[in-house]
Image (cartoon, grey):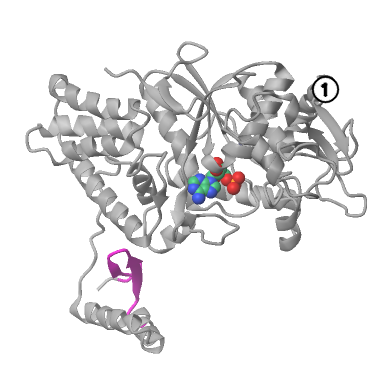
Amino acid sequence: MKEIEFYDTRSRKQRPFTTLKPGHVGMYTCGPTVYAPQHVGNIRSRLLPDLIKRFLQSEGYEVTHVINITDVGHLVADADVGDDKMEVAARKAGLSAEEIAEKYTQMWRDDCAAVNCISPEENPKATDHIPEQIELGKRLEERGYLYTIADGVYFDTSLFPRYAELAGLDLEGQQEGARIGVTEGKKNPSDFAVWKFADPDMKRLQEWDSPWGRGFPGWHLECSAMSVRYLGERFDIHTAGIDLATVHHSNEVAQTECGFEVHPSVEFWMHNEFLDMGGEKMSKSKGNVKTLSNLSERGFDPLAFRYFFLQAHYRQQQAYTYEAIEAAARGLRRLQKIGRALELVEGDGNPGAQAPLKERFRDALADDLNAPRAMAVVWEVARSDDLADVDRRDLLRCFDLILGLRLGEDAAAESEPAWEQDPEIDGLLAERERAREVKDWATADRIRDELTALEVEIIDTPEGARWRRIAGHSG
Ligand code: AMP
Ligand code: ZN
């Protein structure tokens, strides 16, 4: 059996996985900023730690997973200037910051459940941990890392020699290229706010007292404070999308390692690459986003996105297209159909026959979570004529503990719904499809009304429109 190896951003290499405490893994994931719905790019960053957790659990580790909820202090430009995303969203919607946070936290949790992510052990909110953040700020101040300027208290990155290490930053280049006047008074371009002062002329929805004056914590402080609170000063794995490595995580390392005098605070930094759309990173600021609800509206099972995620290595960029999701949905349905049919097979399998396939599947994941290679083994088993059905059943069950694709569930209800057929209704439906293709909405609507009068409901699926009789009305 292959040793487990993961790629670590800080050491820039794939190396053997070890834990600080035998048999236990502490893992922290930068969670959502809850001011808007999460897009499927964010969900990709949620699926990586889920895959890590499921894999390590199958290897016998106990995993404590912490995902924070950012409900304050994340400024629009991800920098130290601009407005707070939560404040902007709350004002726009005419709601309190708490109401906005509550709404989008719940939406994010529903999305995570829809793609079958295992709930984290801890899901702390930044606003519930203001004292811990102030405490860490005080530690940094006592150790001489902070200085105060007009708009807040800043960390002097020139005092932390390892600052550039995690992301391989070119600090001298930053100095040369620094735009004058972005934040007046900052000593170095990479210095960042630990505490921002509330503007006395503008009442904020969220502000607190602190030893430095009334205001709110810098966005980076929460992740240092909450990871230490729930996992200790040093822990095993930290995940997020690669965009957070340069600024957010470099700052997190600076705060934790200087505040608690430890190194390294994180053993493995595991960053996933972006989900792209139209050749660009999917992001709210670019407006090129799709959500899981958008997929559901088009008739896709949200798990199709999980299947899609497993088709690429997490450190490769992945392009989101309608066609790719459609293909993933087809793959998922086929696999579920096979899994469900196999669940009806009775009897005991032969562990000897299963072992080599289990090992190949496991070794693919042990090799820095090579999910596409693992999926190839899954399909080999699903399609195999050589293996006995009981062994295929057992293998798919075992694989699905890690894949989370609900392969064998609901075996009684077959995956493909049994769509009804009726020449008259089928004809009307085909006519409506043709009208829609040529954008003749008037005709399409008229036909839909005719169908409604016949007490028929139209369901748009990835394969086209299907229909069923409205409950209680048959024949
Ligand atoms: P945010 O709510 O923007 O702070 O992002 C939450 C998480 O989603 C972070 O781990 C980001 O790195 C990640 N993320 C944002 N955009 C993308 C994308 N297009 N592809 C993959 N991950 C992303
Ligand atoms: Zn974070």
- From the viewer's perspective, is 267 left or right of 78? left
Q: Pinpoint residue 95: horizontal percent, then vertical percent.
A: 74, 57
Front-most of residues 423 and 14: 14
Q: Is residue 111 visible from the viewing direction of this image?
A: no
Q: Is residue 70 visible from the viewing direction of this image?
A: yes
Badge 1: residue crowd in 10 Å (few <14, some 14–19, many ≥20): few
Residue at position x 89%, y 33% in the image:
212
Front-most of residues 198 and 108: 198
Residue at position x 64%, y 19% in the image:
233
Q: Which residue in the rendered view is the most extreme toward the left?
A: 386
Residue 232 figure quarter: top right
Residue at position x 66%, y 31% in the image:
252
Q: Which residue in the rendered view is the most extreme toward the top?
A: 22
| Secondary element at tag 1 | loop
Q: Which residue, given by chain and number where applicable, does mark 1 sit on?
A: 144
Q: Pinpoint residue 156: horizontal percent, then vertical percent.
A: 77, 31
Q: Amino acid at mark 1?
A: Gly
Using the image, determine if residue 193 lies above or below residue 262.
below
Q: Is residue 233 magenta?
A: no
Q: Pinpoint residue 73: horizontal percent, then vertical percent.
A: 74, 44
**Image quadrant where one finds the N terminus:** top left
Q: Pinpoint residue 141: horizontal percent, then vertical percent.
A: 83, 24
Q: Is residue 461 magenta?
A: yes
Using the image, determine if residue 313 lies above or below residue 141.
below
Give, as a single range, the part of the protein colored magenta.
Answer: 453-473
Residue at position x 37%, y 53% in the image:
301
- From the viewer's perspective, is 236 left or right of 377? right
Residue 420 figure quarter: bottom left
Front-most of residues 171 and 5: 171
